[in-house]
Image (cartoon, rainbow, N blue to C red):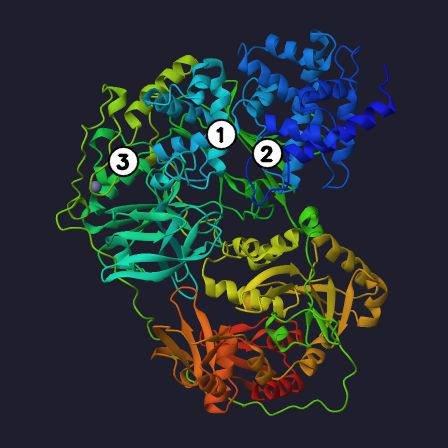
Amino acid sequence: MATNRAAWQEYDRWNAVVADVLFPELDRPAPVYLDVEDHEIEEIGARVGVNADVVVERLGEVVGSTIDRNSVTGGFKDHIERVRHWQNGPQEAVYPAVAALATFSLAAEQMASGDGLSSSNYYGRLANLLGGSKGRLHQSYMKVAEPLWAGLNLWLDRLDGRRGTPTAYALGKRFVGLPMSQALVREADRRRLEQFFVDFDLAPRSDIPAAEIEPLLTSWFRREHQTSHLGKLWAKASLRERFAEVAAVELRSWDGIDTSDESDGGQSRAGRALLALRMRNFPKQHVQLFPFFLVKEPSTARSAKLAVDSGDVAVDLVPAVEVDRAMVLGDGGAVDPASLLGGVLTVRDSAGGEISRMPRGVVVFRDDDQSSLRIETTQVLMGDDIVILALDRSTDRLRQMLADVARPGWTEDVSRSGLPEGWTLFENVEILARPANESGVHNDLRALIPLTSSQLKLTGGLSLPGASRNRWHSARPPHVRAISDSGSEFTVRLLDLGGDLSADDVVVDEWTDDGSGSVLVDSAELQLDDGHYAVEMVVGSAVTARREFSLHSSETRDEVQWSRIDPIVHDLGDPLAVLGAGRPGEGASLVQGVLVETAEIEGPVPAATPPSAVWWKPRNDQARPKGFNLRAPEVGTCFYTGAHRFDLPDARRDNDPRRYVSACTQCGMKKTFSGSYYRNATQYARRHEATEPTPRIDVRSLPPIPAGDADQGISWDVALDALRYLGGGPMSALERVVRQIEPSSLFLTEFVATLEALGHLEVRRSADRLVPEAWEIAPTAIVDTRADRVLAGYWPPDLVADLEEHCEQQRRTVSTARPGGLLTRTSTDASADELADWCQEDVLLARSAGYDLAAQLPVLSAVITALPRVPVTSHGEVQVFDPPSARWVSAFGVDTVGAYRAGRFASTYYIRTENDVAAGTIAVATAYLAKHWAAVTLTGKPLIAYSEKHSALVVPLGALLPGMYQRAVVLDSGIAPEVVRRQNHAYRDVSAAVAGRITYLLEN
Ligand SMILES: [Zn+2]
């Protein structure tokens, strides 16, 4: 029976409505389930124009009329055909099988609320919905279930979380398991799981195999919650595996806030105050320690009260740029680091209530896989990468414990800049085992006993920003780390999920643990192409954990993201365009990348003579003002003594299960659940007929962590290619890429400024605060530098290869070099005329862009006049720029003309001109602008030196030319500035004409 055209038209109408109702666009990415709740049924009914009571029945008929009921196994073959067609079509097209999957999910839901999980139940329900014979539906469904559900995941992945992140994964009983994973747990129940995460101190966004969650949930339900709706679901043993899978998915996206209990407005357990670390290497090794808050309404910046030793002070609470749904202080360095580790951290605000953190003698920080931050955790998991700060009194004990549980190769440091006296920093710690004698572990170190016993994770590499957190750059793919101390041998296999959804997955490679309990694979050695992959951990014939991931590069760019980019074009009619903060306009002088659209230049362009020698003597900045001190805990408490006080008796394996949670009355530290965990894990293992978890991994036999970590060395080139893959977007996405090269804010500023100057990147800054807001990869272009023609903007490798071929025909070459050793410069000796034909519309050719831009730019004083002004408020201790030593020195107040900086980590920069002093205002500026303006204003000399003989223009380190001034100089040569003798930056091959013009602009 061929299905008719009208049936498919009706199906498509329903499919579009069901897709929109079940997967609406979200403000922020969250896991989504194809689970049809009552309010959604109502909405679907309203949109398709049928009564809510009959929506399910009608949907069944509409889907039923598209299947071939006479076919024994091919009932859904038209659906598969349409999915295949969709897969090769545009990335943003709506997935055609949503309506069919909705009926699969409805059947699962009816079954779960009825007789429980069994295949015959399932296909019976499905036959009721769709019509036809149960047996044929069964056969037909088996044939398409996996590819149809995989297609749903692919659709959500392609949209990168805009309609939610995929959740339709099932490890066992895949056919019925897939719809069960969707329909089983209702929205309200999923919120309840947050309470479970809090009770077990699970770190937000952590990855735990579902098999590890199941015993934890068993303990949790045994203690309480048995009578809740959730508890009743849990009581059905056949549903537990699915249930644990849902919990694992939810934990992966959990933001650390428990919203399940709103009875007291959620105040009592809503937030957490933690510490976070940024390990900086630029310009020198330094550890930045700062407060980090998981708190309600994390996207709304607001003021809050911070409790310090002298009372309360007002601070700004702002969204953390690098981590979703978390907040930090506006000035990250507001609290003195020694006091942050040794004092009581308390903040209070109207939205988030009051949250506190008590100091601990051993503080554990976990690598956050979304950012380059390390975030405090109170409970490690097997396989975690951590950094530890320990008080002197704990270091001996800690070393002994690490010898037992961590992979060899961890390091210690007591002299790192930023590290307070009396604390030791332990780095490169990978937790790969449990301690031999758990009950002997000192309470200070309990956080280091892993709660779980196995892990399959992807770590390192260059991870690409995105909601699904499963994308990496193919030049820097993740390491695979699989660990299990269950004693059973296991295998890890890598699958290529490649091309066709309905084809079988291809096993690319396979590794066994040979009884060692761990498999560590550097996937870079496999030289994988861009594509979709999965790793699985297999014990016997059962898959116990699975992670999907995809690899990308600029050749397989993110089309959905690219289609949403707002082009960034600067109009020099507004002087703030020099800083990328001008208003858009119809002006005569537009700049985008290396493209400078200008009016005819009339008459001679004014120029001046630059200083011929370096006239400043660079010195180190003076130390910044010290931060606040927090209140210290009372003398004699556990922070000083290490003796924690528990109200309840210690956890013992044979205790009444209701009595084994207890928290220290002084610091709030919880005793872990490991005793009960092991009992549960044993029961779990028995039920699954695996060996009991008794042996432990001998970490001493593992290969040590290579010195100078192999993950380091994400080059500027790979980072730029990652940006080309993304195309553009919010600044947070760019930051997540760049901070993987180096986490410091100074580096980020320099990296962005350099890429802008080379015409690879465009950035739009806010007009009021001059902070970067959005970025985009500049159009594909070639800039003529006189000496050669240099590539700028979007150049994926296949396009470069194309150009090479063309140049070969002209007997010309394309060559690469790395001036300064950072970024590859690709250029050709073919002339502009020889390239003109090949370029046509797709590639833009810019001639003398450097000089043209310099000729069009406004003078510095015009930029200064256009800067946003704010009233002078108390800035407390600030620093002022001293041009002769090219450094920041301490200042009290901002009363006089000068360039100032306030704040400690990410500073804000200001300028006060004579007019500002008279008017009581202060101008918001950028670091580079402030320095160059201060030099001309205070000394009468521009902060540059130019050697005509060497065609080199020199500025102090950290004082690159601001904005478009730098772009004009760099485009003259296509060469990024280089560091000279660790004191200055030099721009090479700068013509006298451009140097003279820039001098004029700075002096006027
Ligand atoms: Zn304590």
Quarter-wise, where is residue 523 in the image? top right
Question: Residue visible at 60% across and 9% down?
Answer: 121
Q: Position of residue 726 (x, y in %)?
A: 64, 52
Identify the element where label 3 is drawn: loop
Residue that appears at 63% across and 80% down: 990
Amino acid type, mark 2: Pro
Distance from Cα at disc 2 to Cα at disc 3:
33 Å
Q: Earlier in the sequence, mark 2 or mark 1?
A: 2
| x and y percentages locating residue 392 in the rendered image | 20, 51
The amino acid on which the numbered mark 1 sits, given as a three-letter code, is: Ala
Where does label 1 land, which residue? 188
Write down the quadrant of residue 52 in the picture. top right
- How dense is the environment of label 2, judged by Cα within 10 Å: few (below 14), some, or many (20 and up)? many
Q: Secondary structure at mark 1?
A: helix
What residue sits right under mark 2 in the picture? 166
| Residue 334, placed above or below residue 893 | above
Total numbered labels placed on residues in the image: 3
Measure the C-alpha gap from mark 1 to mark 3.
Answer: 27 Å
**Precedes in sequence: disc 2 or disc 3:** 2
The residue most toward the front is 51
Label 3 CB less than 8 angstroms from ligand 1: no
Are the two marked residues, 2 and 3, in contact with CB atoms closer than 8 angstroms? no
